[in-house]
Image (tube, rainbow, N blue to C red):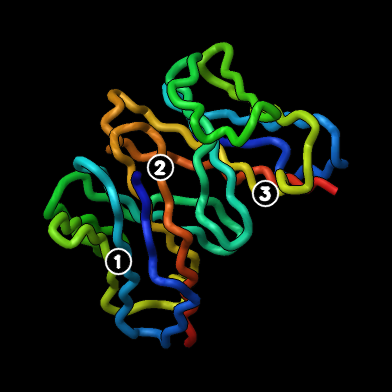
Amino acid sequence: GAGVSQTPSNKVTEKGKYVELRCDPISGHTALYWYRQSLGQGPEFLIYFQGTGAADDSGLPNDRFFAVRPEGSVSTLKIQRTERGDSAVYLCASSYNRGATGADTQYFGPGTRLTVL
Amino acid sequence: GNSVTQMEGPVTLSEEAFLTINCTYTATGYPSLFWYVQYPGEGLQLLLKATKADDKGSNKGFEATYRKETTSFHLEKGSVQVSDSAVYFCALNNQGGKLIFGQGTELSVKP
């Protein structure tokens, strides 16, 4: 079946602009996660949705970052007033997550490479 | 807090050599432990996992055992192939939904 998809695959923007990154999870997965991966580093957690609500947004670096999942499926990560330091690969993952035990496998999308000039 | 530490790379091996990539963690309670792999030009994919102490995860000839007494989850493979060249990430999930990753270890296998 289809995996997690993310669009766009690449996004180049100028400092100060607004960007939206989209994630389509695997059908039937209730949990959705956003991570950010800088070059040479492991992914860092940003936010986690269970259904439509954000269950944990402790990884969002500041109030320029916001994410929504209005119908419990597709999610959009929104970044306002982008800065050069926001340049990274933004990864989305989903899991079936029948319970928040931490044992569920998270399936990752290919990522969106964001470059802020 | 929760954290994961991996051995630094890059690791360069000849084909058919034995592989160990060390991973240790810090966590309260009983986290689940994972190894993810990122092949060149591809996304992260789960390699194996273990959800409780003394469990052994295995896949594609790779193995890792959840050792609570040493807080470790070292990745091993008896005979690596060129196709195993990738970046390997150790991660934990401490019942909170989010994965906490190590910094990654790049493996290069030469023919």
Report the chain holding disc 3.
Answer: A
Of A60 and B42, which appears nearest the observer? A60
Report the chain holding disc 2.
Answer: B
**C-alpha separation, residue under disc 2 versus residue under disc 1:** 18 Å
In the rendered image, the vertical position of residue A48 relative to residue B55, given as above or below: above
Q: Is residue A8 left or right of residue A15?
A: left
Q: Is residue A18 left or right of residue A99?
A: right
Graded by Cα atoms within 10 Å as few (under 14), some (14 to 19) or many (20 or more), the crowding at tag 3 reads some
Residue shown at the point (46%, 32%) measured from the top left: A94
**C-alpha separation, residue under disc 2 versus residue under disc 3:** 18 Å
Residue receiving disc 1:
B75
Q: Are marks 3 and 1 on the same chain?
A: no
Q: Quadrant of residue B7?
A: bottom left
- Amino acid type, callout 2: Leu
Q: How far across and how far down the image is residue B47, in percent? A: 36, 55
- Amino acid type, callout 1: Leu
Q: Which mark is residue A1?
A: none
Report the chain holding disc 1.
Answer: B
Residue receiving disc 2:
B99
At numbered mark 3, what does the secondary structure look like: helix, strand or loop?
A: strand
At numbered mark 2, what does the secondary structure look like: helix, strand or loop?
A: loop
Q: Mark 2–mark 3 contact, CB under 8 Å?
A: no
Residue receiving disc 3:
A88
Residue shown at the point (72%, 48%) measured from the top left: A85
In the rendered image, the vertical position of residue A69 relative to residue A24, given as above or below: above
Decide if residue A65 is in sight here.
yes
Graded by Cα atoms within 10 Å as few (under 14), some (14 to 19) or many (20 or more), the crowding at tag 2 reads many
Q: How far across and how far down the image is residue A82, in percent? A: 78, 37
Q: How far across and how far down the image is residue B88, in percent? A: 43, 63
The mark lying in front, picked from 2 and 1, is: 2
